[in-house]
Image: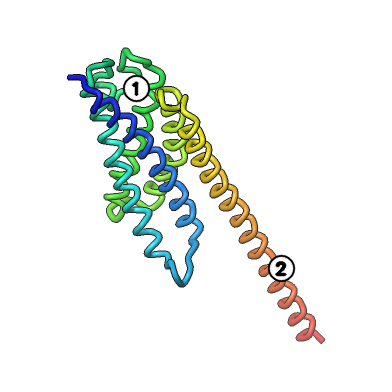
């Protein structure tokens, strides 16, 4: 089965999925850094992160489904979960497959979070940092729309957003560490003063 509707649906859902995955990454980084405000408490942020992740999975699923159903190019059902199973652009399709597999692993473990060891869940969730660049590479390699200026600009905006969020997270973690060390140094100094006073 092949039709322009499937072709456009594949392209549109792929672009939307990439934008949503970017938003999921940024929200995840902010949630991991325990960012909150009076007007946007952390529980609301976590809930938004969860909901955007679910919508991302839906658009990704429609993107994959329309890609496989459209017979204009042969991707094949096996390529949905098995990398390099497609005869059409095997390397680029494989990146999409790997990104899908990673997102599935993250999604399933998130649903089972309360039944899993926290350390194991956290380790699997770190795969999100791999799924985004893999999905981005898949989009650049496969997407014919990446010849269009607005799509390139959109992709650049996604890259800037994730890099800015990641840079901010690293900087905040370093600042928090310096704050903890400074507090520990002050406490140690105060303890030394008290010991000296008692000895006198």
Q: Quadrant of residue 184?
A: bottom right
Looking at the rendered image, the quarter that the N terminus falls into is top left
Residue 13's place in the image compared with 75, above or below, is below
Instruction: Name the residue carrying label 2.
Output: 185
Pointer 1: residues within 10 angstroms few (<14), some, or many (20+)? some
User: Which residue of the protein is positioned furthest toward the top in this rendering?
Assistant: 87
Using the image, tell me which numbered label, if any, was put on residue 9. none
Query: Could you tell me which residue is drawn at 60 percent across and 57 percent down?
Result: 172
Query: Could you tell me which residue is drawn at 26 percent across and 16 percent down?
Result: 72
Residue 44's place in the image compared with 53, above or below, is below
Residue sitting nearer the eye, 148 or 61? 148
Query: Could you tell me which residue is drawn at 28 percent across and 22 percent down?
Result: 79
Position of residue 170 measured from the top left corner of the image (x, y, whole percent): 59, 50
Q: Earlier in the sequence, mark 2 or mark 1?
A: 1
Position of residue 52 measured from the top left corner of the image (x, y, whole percent): 34, 50
Task: Tell me the SS state at disc 1.
Answer: loop
User: Which residue of the protein is positioned furthest toward the left in this rendering?
Assistant: 1
Position of residue 45 measured from the top left corner of the image (x, y, whole percent): 40, 60
Pointer 2: residues within 10 angstroms few (<14), some, or many (20+)? few
Looking at the rendered image, the quarter that the C terminus falls into is bottom right
* Cα–Cα gap, marks 2 and 1: 52 Å
Residue 114's place in the image compared with 88, above or below, is below
Position of residue 53 measured from the top left corner of the image (x, y, whole percent): 34, 47
Q: Quadrant of residue 189?
A: bottom right
Disc number lying in front (2 or 1) = 1
Say left or right for 179 vs 154.
Answer: right
Residue 22's place in the image compared with 96, above or below, is below
Query: Could you tell me which residue is drawn at 28 percent across and 19 percent down?
Result: 75
Instruction: Name the residue carrying label 1.
Output: 83
Task: Tell me the SS state at disc 2.
Answer: helix
Residue sitting nearer the eye, 131 or 67? 67
């Amino acid at each position: 089965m092949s039709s322009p509707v499937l072709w456009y649906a594949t392209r549109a859902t792929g672009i939307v999925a990439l934008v949503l995955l970017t938003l999921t990454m940024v929200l995840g980084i902010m949630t991991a850094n325990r960012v909150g405000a009076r007007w946007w408490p952390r529980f609301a942020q976590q809930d938004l992160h969860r909901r955007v992740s679910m919508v991302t999975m839906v658009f990704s699923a429609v993107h994959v489904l329309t890609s496989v159903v459209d017979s204009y190019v042969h991707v094949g059902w096996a390529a949905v979960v098995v990398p390099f199973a497609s005869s059409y652009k095997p390397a680029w399709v494989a990146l999409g497959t790997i990104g899908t597999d990673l997102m599935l692993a993250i999604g399933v473990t998130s649903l089972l979070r309360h039944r899993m060891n926290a350390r194991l869940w956290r380790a699997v969730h770190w795969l999100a940092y791999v799924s985004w660049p893999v999905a981005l590479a898949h989009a650049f390699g496969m997407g014919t729309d990446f010849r269009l200026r607005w799509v390139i600009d959109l992709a650049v905006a996604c890259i800037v957003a994730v890099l800015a969020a990641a840079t901010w997270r690293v900087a905040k973690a370093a600042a928090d560490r310096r704050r903890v060390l400074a507090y520990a140094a002050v406490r140690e100094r105060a303890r030394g003063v008290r010991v000296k006073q008692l000895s006198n």
